[in-house]
Amino acid sequence: MLIKSPKPSALKENQVTDEGIYQSRRTLLKSLGFIGASGLLAQTSTANAGLFDLFKKNPVKAFTVSPLKYQQAPLEISVTAQILTPEAKVTSHNNFYEFGAQKSQPAQLAQQFKVKPWQLTISGHCNNPLTLDYDDLFSSFELEERIYRLRCVEAWSMVIPWLGFSLTKLLQKAQPNSRAKYVVFETLYDPEQMPGQKNRRLGGGISYPYVEGLRIDEAMNPLTLMSVGLYGKTLPPQNGAPIRLVVPWKYGFKSIKSIVAIKFVEQQPANTWNTLIPNEYGFYANVNPTVDHPRWSQASERRITSGGLLARNRIKTQMFNGYGEEVAELYKGMDLSKYY
Ligand code: MTE
């Protein structure tokens, strides 16, 4: 589904202002009428030059990202983009434990990651199991831009312009049957390429491959996105190339990266963080300011902006990360402190 009219939840992005670049890109776009994705990109990268200077410590990039053609987010939504997290921060402050447990490690250690060839298989309780190769990921569905808040369980957040398609479009292709109650996702397991899978300490003690799961109705919610890009280009490896999940009303650990397998199952699956520390991380992981993490409050979050660590950017966390209008119904009658 293309989200044409902005929901109220998508418009509450005025707490902080920081990234004018994307906004001016849109103003330019509006004044010129449509310009193609490549023209757009040229504008963006020129404008971003200053930002990149701020991040000179970034490693030399071996991985190349390519421009993508996509349906842009409606202008009304992109007005909110004035607070987008700068691209340089989105791609340098990451959680991707397969490439190290520290925020800066994925951008440094993932640059040689090979995304071609790639295979994503969809199997389990469905009538039409299928496999997509690398090119299929970009050509099977029209790509659209979705500007979503990403709220990490560690109480930081970003606003990111993703490119992708609704997961439901992909799942429908596979024709799940009545036994499909949950959907499981699995990240590539390749210790030769992913040093954190080889070295337990680097990989945060996780048993790989990283797995995640959603209830089938959560997976079929139109907000649930399969992302193949951000900021107009293919995903860099540290953000989950070539394809990842984005579930904007849940803590970021549900948004599993570099997916190779999706399976329809009958029972609630184990998920990586719940298996590792069950009393701290649940299966549902809905953003919820009223249910604290055992070791810290979830009532507020640090919005990552172009300011430094000392920037005054602590904001209140919203129930379901502000997407309640679209998803609260899914949890009617459930005790969300029990099903955290
Ligand atoms: N997926 C895999 N395979 N491995 C990971 O370590 N980290 C998760 C999620 N997906 C993770 C993952 C967490 S904790 C977060 S907050 C988000 O990715 C971060 O996404 P980003 O680095 O693109 O901001």
Image (cartoon, rainbow, N blue to C red):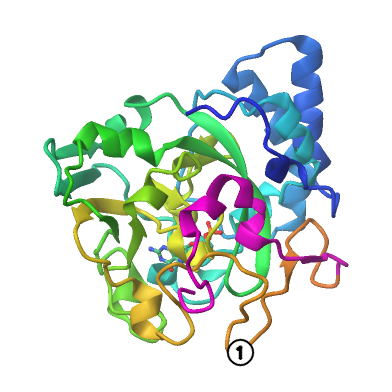
Q: Point out the stretch of residues depicted in magenta.
A: 311-340
Q: Going by the image, does 36 lie left or right of 131?
A: right
* In magenta segment, residue 113: no
Asked if 115 appears above or below 321 in the picture, the reply is above
Q: Going by the image, does 84 lie left or right of 127?
A: right
Query: Where in the figure is residue 263, as x and y percent of width and height?
Result: 21, 53
Q: Residue at x 30, y 63 (%)?
A: 193
Q: Residue at x 64, y 19 (%)?
A: 39
Q: Going by the image, does 48 lie left or right of 90?
A: right
Asked if 228 appears above or below 211 in the picture, the reply is above
Tell me if residue 248 can be seen: no
Q: Going by the image, does 55 lie left or right of 150?
A: right
Question: Could you say whether the residue bearing mark 1 is in a helix, strand or loop?
Answer: loop
Q: Which residue is mark 1?
A: 295
Q: Disc 1 beta carbon < 8 A from ligand 1?
A: no
Query: Where in the figure is residue 294, as x and y percent of width and height?
Result: 58, 89
Amino acid carrying mark 1 in the image: Arg
* In magenta segment, residue 333: yes
Query: Where in the figure is residue 34, as x and y percent of width and height?
Result: 67, 12
